[in-house]
Image (cartoon, rainbow, N blue to C red):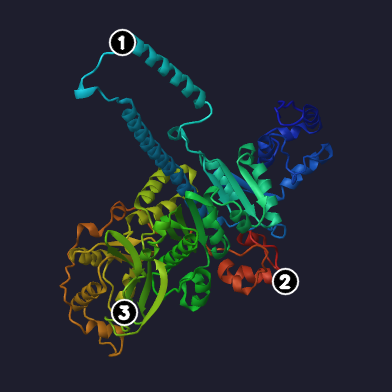
C-alpha cells in the first residue's frame, strides 16, 4: 500500500486521531475519498462530530462512506447542504426554484448592512459636532469689565492652578466608572438575523457564509426533522457556520413575541400566507431594522374569487385588473403596516418585488406615535371599472392644518361616480391598499450596483439584475399600472407599439415608465381621460370594424377627444436599459417552474400543473422512473399508489 501524508486533525483527541489513521488511512486522502466525505472531514472542527454520519468509534468508520452515499450534495452560492437522494427518506422541504428569492435577500441584506453603517456614522458625526460646540461654549471664559483683561497676583494664580489640578484628578477618577454620553456606541454592533422558518437551513447558512459583518443568525423551526437537517447541514459547512448559526426547535411566533426588538433583521418565508407571523414579526424587529417577508398565496392575493379569504388574512379586498401582482404587494404592505401601528410602529418600504410565483417585500420598521397618525395618508381604496381597464384611487385620510398644527381626518369622497365616466359600466371597490411608494430608488440602485460588483457570488445573477434594473426605472410614486394590450382590446383595435404610446404620453406633458410586475405594463401619472384620448386618436388613424352598441369600446370611442395626441417619437420613450439592450424580463429556466409541493403531502392528479401530467400519472400508478425523482425531488415522500 502506498504511503499517505498524515493529516492534521486538531479537533480530535490525539489517541482517537491516531487510531483513525491506523484503522482507515485511505479515507484521509482526497484522491481516494469522495468529495463530500473529504469536505466533511476537513470542515469538522472543535470536536463537533456529525451524529448522522456516526463518528463515534472505529467500528463505524466503514459505514461513514456508505451513509454519505445516500445523500446528494446541493451547492448554492457558498453553502452546501445534504439532501437525501431517495424521495421516501426526505421529509424536509427544499425548493431549488427559490434561489432567486435567496439571492435577492442576500443582496438586500448586504445593502442594509452598508446603509446601517452609514446612518450610524452620520449620527456619531452629529453627536461629535454637538459635543465640540458644547465644549467651546464652556471653554470661552468672560473677560473683565469693558472687555479688558485684569492682572492677578501670584497668590490668585496659585489658587487657580490648585483648583485646576484637583478638577483633573476628579475627572480621571470618574472617567473609569462613567463613560460620557457622546462617546457611547462608537462602533455599530454586528446585526443579528432571525430566520423564522429555517427548514433545511440553507438560507441561514448562506447568510452566515456569504455576508460579511454579520453577527449571529437564529434559525427557527417547529418541525424536529427540519432542525435535525439544519444541524447536519451546519456541521457539513464547517466551524465558521456553527459559530454563527443557532438552531432552535420552537414556534416562531412564540419566540418572536418573547424577544421584542432584539433582531436587526427578521426573515419570514413561509409555505403560503405569512399573515399569522406578521403580528409577532413587527414586534421582534429592532428600531430601524429590516423585515423581509414572502407570500406565495397569489391565488388569494390576486383573485376576486377569493376576496373573502384575502380579507380575513390581510384585511383587504383584491380587484380584477392586470395590475393584480402589484396590488398583491400593496395589500401585503398595508397588512404589515396595520400590524405595526398597533404597537406605535410604522414601516418604510425599501424594495418590493413580484417575481416568479410569489411576492417579496423588504421594509424597515421604526417606532413613532406621531408617524403612525400619518398612516391613513398612505392607504387608498381602489375603484375598478367592470367594463374597461379604468381605475381610480381614493385616499383613506387627509391632513388638516389649523393654527400651526396638523391633524388627520377621514378623506372626502366619493372621488368617482357609481358609473365609469369612460364606458358607463359599474365600478367595484377594493382595498385598502398601500398607495405610498413601494420602493426606495436609492436602495434599488445601490443594491443593483452591489450585485454587479459581485457577479460571481450570485447563482441567479441574470434574474435578480433584470428585476432590479426594471425596478430602478419605474415610477415609484405612481400606484398600479395598466396593460397596453388590454386597453387596446377594450376598443377592439390593433395595439400601438410601447414606444409610440409612451411618446404620446410624454408629448402630452406626463410621465410614463414600465413596471417590473408585467412586461406589457405601463405606469403613468396621466389621468384616464388623457389615456383614452390617445387611444381615440390612434383609432382615427387606424380604423376598426363597427362594434356592438352596448360594448365598452363603442361608448369610449363615441366621445370626441379633447387632446390631440402627438405620436412623434420622444427621446425619453426608450429607457436606458432598453437602449443598452439589457435584459429586463427573463423566461422561466425550466418546465413546471413553480412553488412545488409541500413536504409530506400526497401527490395526486391536482399536482399535474406543478410536476407535469406524465410524471404524476407514473407516480400514482407506481411506475415512476428514475428521472421522475429529479422532477419531484426534493419535495415529498413517495405517495401512496391508487
Distance Cα–Cα, label 2 vs label 3: 49 Å
Instruction: Report if the CB atoms under discs 3 and 1 are less than 8 Å apart.
Output: no
Where does the image place residue 357, in percent across and percent down from the top left?
49, 64
Tell me which numbered mark, 2 or 1, is placed earlier along the sequence. 1
Which residue is most to the bottom? 549
Residue nearest the viewer, comparing 389 with 9: 389
Image quadrant holding the C terminus, namely bottom right
Q: Which one is in front in this view, the residue at disc 2 or the one at disc 1?
A: 1
Badge 2: residue crowd in 10 Å (few <14, some 14–19, many ≥20): few
Q: Earlier in the sequence, mark 2 or mark 3?
A: 3
* Distance from Cα at disc 3 to Cα at disc 1: 99 Å
Q: Tell me which residue sits at (16%, 68%) in the image.
A: 566
Horizontal placement of 389 versus 115: left or right? left
**In the rendering, at what x and y percent does residue 155 appear?**
35, 10
Measured as percent of width and height from the top left, residue 406 is found at 31, 61
- Residue underneath mark 1: 153
Near mark 1 (Cα within 10 A), the count class, few <14, some 14-19 or many ≥20, is few
Residue corresponding to mark 3: 490
Q: Which mark is residue 641?
A: 2
Question: Toward which corner of the image does residue 455 lie, by quadrant?
Answer: top left
Amino acid at each position: 500500500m502506498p504511503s499517505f501524508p498524515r493529516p492534521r486533525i486538531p479537533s480530535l483527541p490525539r489517541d482517537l486521531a491516531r487510531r483513525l489513521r491506523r484503522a482507515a488511512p485511505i479515507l484521509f486522502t482526497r484522491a481516494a475519498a469522495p468529495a463530500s466525505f473529504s469536505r466533511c472531514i476537513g470542515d469538522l472542527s472543535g470536536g463537533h462530530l456529525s451524529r448522522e454520519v456516526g463518528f463515534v468509534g472505529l467500528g463505524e468508520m466503514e459505514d461513514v462512506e456508505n451513509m454519505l452515499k445516500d445523500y446528494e450534495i446541493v451547492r448554492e452560492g457558498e453553502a452546501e447542504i445534504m439532501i437525501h437522494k431517495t424521495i421516501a427518506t426526505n421529509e424536509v422541504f427544499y425548493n431549488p426554484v427559490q434561489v432567486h428569492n435567496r439571492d435577492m435577500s442576500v443582496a438586500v441584506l448586504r445593502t442594509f448592512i452598508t446603509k446601517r453603517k452609514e446612518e450610524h456614522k452620520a449620527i456619531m458625526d452629529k453627536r461629535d459636532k454637538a459635543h465640540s460646540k458644547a465644549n467651546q461654549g464652556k471653554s470661552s471664559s468672560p473677560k473683565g469689565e469693558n472687555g479688558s483683561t485684569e492682572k492677578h497676583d501670584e497668590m490668585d494664580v496659585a489658587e487657580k492652578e490648585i483648583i485646576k489640578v484637583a478638577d483633573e484628578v476628579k475627572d480621571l477618577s470618574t472617567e473609569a466608572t462613567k463613560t460620557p454620553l457622546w462617546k457611547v456606541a462608537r462602533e455599530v454592533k454586528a446585526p443579528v438575523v432571525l430566520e423564522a422558518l429555517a427548514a433545511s437551513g440553507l438560507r441561514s447558512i448562506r447568510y452566515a457564509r456569504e455576508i460579511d459583518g454579520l453577527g449571529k443568525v437564529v434559525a427557527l423551526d417547529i418541525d424536529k426533522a427540519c432542525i435535525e437537517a439544519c444541524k447536519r447541514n451546519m456541521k457539513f459547512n464547517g466551524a465558521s457556520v456553527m459559530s454563527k448559526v443557532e438552531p432552535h426547535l420552537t414556534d416562531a411566533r412564540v419566540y418572536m413575541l418573547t424577544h421584542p426588538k432584539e433582531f436587526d433583521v427578521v426573515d419570514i418565508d413561509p409555505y403560503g400566507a405569512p399573515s399569522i407571523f406578521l403580528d409577532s414579526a413587527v414586534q421582534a424587529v429592532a428600531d430601524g431594522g429590516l423585515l423581509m417577508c414572502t407570500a406565495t398565496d397569489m391565488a388569494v392575493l390576486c383573485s376576486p374569487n377569493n376576496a373573502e379569504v384575502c380579507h380575513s388574512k390581510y384585511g383587504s379586498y383584491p380587484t380584477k385588473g392586470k395590475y393584480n401582482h402589484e396590488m398583491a404587494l400593496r395589500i401585503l404592505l398595508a397588512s404589515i403596516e396595520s400590524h405595526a401601528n398597533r404597537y406605535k410602529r410604522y414601516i418604510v418600504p425599501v424594495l418590493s418585488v413580484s417575481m416568479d410565483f410569489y411576492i417579496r417585500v423588504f421594509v424597515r420598521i421604526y417606532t413613532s406615535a406621531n408617524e403612525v397618525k400619518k398612516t391613513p395618508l398612505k392607504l387608498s381604496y381602489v375603484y375598478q371599472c367592470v367594463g374597461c381597464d379604468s381605475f381610480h384611487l381614493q385616499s383613506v385620510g387627509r391632513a388638516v392644518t389649523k393654527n400651526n398644527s396638523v391633524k388627520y381626518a377621514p378623506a372626502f369622497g366619493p372621488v368617482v361616480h357609481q358609473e365609469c365616466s369612460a364606458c358607463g359600466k359599474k365600478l367595484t371597490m377594493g382595498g385598502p391598499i398601500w398607495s405610498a411608494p413601494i420602493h426606495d430608488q436609492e436602495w434599488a440602485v445601490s443594491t443593483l450596483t452591489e450585485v454587479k460588483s459581485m457577479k460571481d457570488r450570485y447563482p441567479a445573477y441574470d434574474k435578480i439584475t433584470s428585476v432590479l434594473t426594471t425596478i430602478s426605472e419605474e415610477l415609484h410614486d405612481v400606484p398600479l399600472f395598466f396593460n397596453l394590450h388590454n386597453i387596446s382590446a377594450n376598443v377592439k383595435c390593433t395595439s400601438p407599439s410601447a414606444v409610440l404610446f409612451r411618446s404620446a404620453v410624454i408629448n402630452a406633458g406626463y410621465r410614463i415608465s414600465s413596471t417590473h410586475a408585467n412586461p406589457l405594463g405601463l405606469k403613468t401619472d396621466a389621468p384616464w381621460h388623457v389615456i383614452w384620448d390617445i387611444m381615440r386618436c390612434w383609432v382615427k388613424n387606424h380604423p376598426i370594424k363597427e362594434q356592438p352598441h352596448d360594448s365598452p369600446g363603442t361608448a369610449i370611442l363615441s366621445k370626441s377627444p379633447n387632446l390631440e395626441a402627438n405620436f412623434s417619437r420622444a427621446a425619453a420613450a426608450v429607457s436606458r436599459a432598453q437602449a443598452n439592450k439589457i435584459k429586463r424580463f427573463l423566461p422561466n429556466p425550466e418546465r413546471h417552474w413553480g412553488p412545488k409541493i409541500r413536504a409530506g403531502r400526497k401527490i395526486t392528479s391536482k399536482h399535474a400543473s406543478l410536476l407535469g401530467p406524465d410524471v404524476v400519472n407514473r407516480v400514482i400508478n407506481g411506475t415512476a422512473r428514475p428521472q421522475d425523482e429529479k422532477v419531484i425531488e426534493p419535495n415529498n415522500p413517495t405517495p401512496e399508489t391508487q
